């Protein structure tokens, strides 16, 4: 089994759960993309990329992110960053330690939101300062 690259974001938000998850909503884009692929009378020669989710725009995905490879933990209460990391499908102790150290180095010791996105091809060279109240922690390899 090959290594898998995961990207981690973590932080604290005061948004409601509905407000927080709106950032990841790709319903409009998926519907438009489906019409582009199936409707012979579709008015443009490409789907409307402005309809992509805010998350996809922030990570510069041409289409939308693959929902099968994202894990999002949201809670109204802050928990330790270690407990938040344990909510993710990492399953490798050393990788969890590396993620923990990276969070602490960025000043994150508690969080109420954490996100893991598996994408071997994604490269975030110049991270934004804010991704829906989360910081980009970094990318990590999970041994296979």
Image: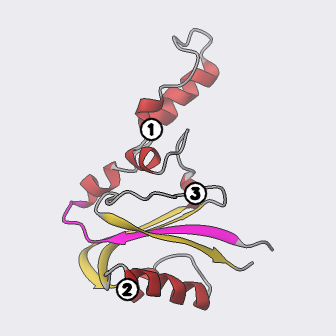
Q: Between tags 2 and 1, which lies in front? A: 2
For the point 31% across and 86% down, which residue is it? 109
Crowding around mark 2 (Cα neighbors within 10 Å: few <14, some 14 to 19, many 20+) is some
Q: Which residue is mark 2?
A: 104
In the visual, does 2 lie left or right of 13?
right
Q: Which residue is mark 1?
A: 52
Q: Secondary structure at mark 2?
A: helix
For the point 55% across and 13% down, which residue is it? 42
Q: Position of residue 82 (x, y in %)?
A: 41, 88
Q: Position of residue 135 (x, y in %)?
A: 36, 67
In the visual, does 25 lie left or right of 89?
left
- Look at the image and give the residue range highlighted in magenta: 4-16
Measured Cα–Cα span from mark 2 to mark 1? 32 Å
Q: Position of residue 17 (x, y in %)?
A: 27, 60
Q: Is residue 1 visible?
A: yes
Q: Nearer the viewer, residue 2 or 24?
A: 2
Q: Which residue is mark 3?
A: 123
Q: Quarter of the image holding residue 5? A: bottom right
């Amino acid at each position: 089994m090959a290594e898998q690259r995961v990207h981690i974001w973590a932080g604290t938000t005061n948004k409601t759960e509905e407000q927080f998850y709106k950032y990841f909503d790709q319903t409009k884009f998926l519907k438009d993309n489906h019409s582009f692929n199936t409707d012979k009378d579709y008015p443009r020669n490409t789907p409307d990329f402005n309809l992509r989710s805010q998350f996809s725009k922030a990570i510069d995905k041409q289409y939308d992110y693959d929902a099968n490879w994202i894990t999002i933990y949201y809670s109204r209460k802050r928990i330790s960053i270690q407990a938040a990391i344990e909510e993710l499908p990492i399953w490798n102790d050393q990788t969890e330690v590396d993620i923990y150290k990276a969070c602490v180095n960025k000043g994150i010791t508690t969080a109420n939101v954490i996100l893991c996105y598996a994408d071997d091809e994604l490269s975030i060279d110049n991270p934004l300062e804010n991704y829906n109240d989360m910081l980009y922690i970094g990318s990590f390899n999970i041994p296979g």
